[in-house]
Structures are given as C-alpha cells and as structure tokens.
Image: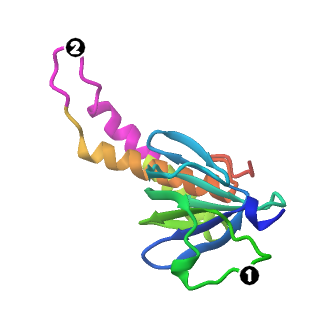
Amino acid sequence: MADDVLLAVELVTPERVLFTGTAAQVILRTTDGEITFLPGHTPLVGEVAPCVVRVVADDGAEVRVAVHGGFVQVGPADVASSGDTVAPSTVAPATQVTLLAGVAELADDIDTERAKTALDAAAARVAELGVAGRVPGPGDEPTEDEGLVEAQAALRRAEVRLEAAGVAAGTGTGV
C-alpha cells in the first residue's frame, strides 16, 4: 500500500513513545464511543476512554496497546514542522493520529498473571462495595461511593490489560 493511503501514528505516554510509524487504520474508544480512523479522517480532538487501541498496518498486522485514558488528536500530517523533507516522487501520509495517554502499555509487555490477580481483587472489591453503594431511588439524592468508583476503575483497567494481551478475563485462555 502506498504511503499516501496510510496514517502517520504516534502513541505517547509521559515515560516513553510506545509506537511511531504508519498504519492503515487506528481503532479505539473515545468517551463518545468506538471510532476507527482512516486516512483522510476529518480533524478531531477527543477524550480516550480506557480501551485497547489497535493500530492496524496495511498488511493486517496489529499492534495492541492497553490505554487507560488520554486524548487523541487527528489532523493533517505536518511534515514541514518535523524537519523532514519529502522528495517530489514520495508522498508522505496526509493524516496524523496522535494519542497522548497518561498510562498505557504494549500488549507484549503485559504481565497477564499480575493482571488476572488485579482483576480478581478488583472484582471482589466491587462486589463488597456494591452492596453498600446501591443505586439511588426516585427522590433520593445521588451519592457516589468514592471507593466503589475506584474499584470499578481498577476492574476496568485489569479487563483492558487482559483484553490487549489476548487473554479472556477470568478464564486464562486466549481470546
């Protein structure tokens, strides 16, 4: 596939650049829902929900990344600002996808046993706190149990890590 039908992609955390390169598509979940970015995508800035980000190469190979929130920006690739020059016969990717994540890890770097242990602990904590954190009825003032919210977030993080690693949560088998 020619470079003119690819995306320029960067996945960055405060600690390191997890991925930089080209891709045919990037699939992730924003707070508004799941989205697929393709070359020529309209400009967008969005909040990334905890999810597995899939960077799909033109040959179908995938890089999977467990992302625990962040921001995505899609727009025209800015070759000039990077100092790169493009020869007249070479067409650079026209669309840039930049993902800034506070915490993220490549699927190959995930310790699945640790993630399973975290999943079990978070599920137990959610079950324990869920009884006390009942849903308010009509006329009740909504209250949020901070401990329950954090336990649910920990549960989601563990689920995302296992999904990125290709392990079904709770079964220990590949998905």
Give whichever of 86, 139 is nearer the camera. 86
Question: Could you say where residue 113 lies in the image, as x and y percent from the top left?
Answer: 61, 63
Question: Could you say where residue 141 lies in the image, as x and y percent from the top left?
Answer: 15, 25
Give whichever of 124, 71 is nearer the camera. 71
Give whichever of 74, 109 is nearer the camera. 74
**Span shown in magenta:** 123-142
Question: Could you tell me which residue is drawn at 80 percent across and 76 percent down?
Answer: 89
Quadrant in the picture for residue 80: bottom right
**Residue 11 against residue 166 in the figure, above or below:** below
Q: Secondary structure at mark 2?
A: loop
Q: Which residue is mark 2?
A: 138
Question: Could you say where residue 53 lies in the image, as x and y percent from the top left?
Answer: 60, 56
Mark closer to the observer (1, 2): 1
Give whichever of 21, 156 is nearer the camera. 21
In the rendered image, the quadrant that contains the N terminus is bottom right
Q: Which residue is mark 1?
A: 87
Mark 1 vs 2: CB contact within 8 A: no
Q: Is residue 133 magenta?
A: yes
Circle 2: residue type = Pro
Circle 1: residue type = Ala
Query: Can the viewer see residue 132?
Result: yes
Question: Could you tell me which residue is drawn at 74 percent across and 81 percent down?
Answer: 87
Question: Could you say where residue 36 lies in the image, as x and y percent from the top left?
Answer: 63, 47
Q: Residues within 10 Å of mark 2 (few under 14, many from 20)?
A: few
Residue 6, label in figure: none
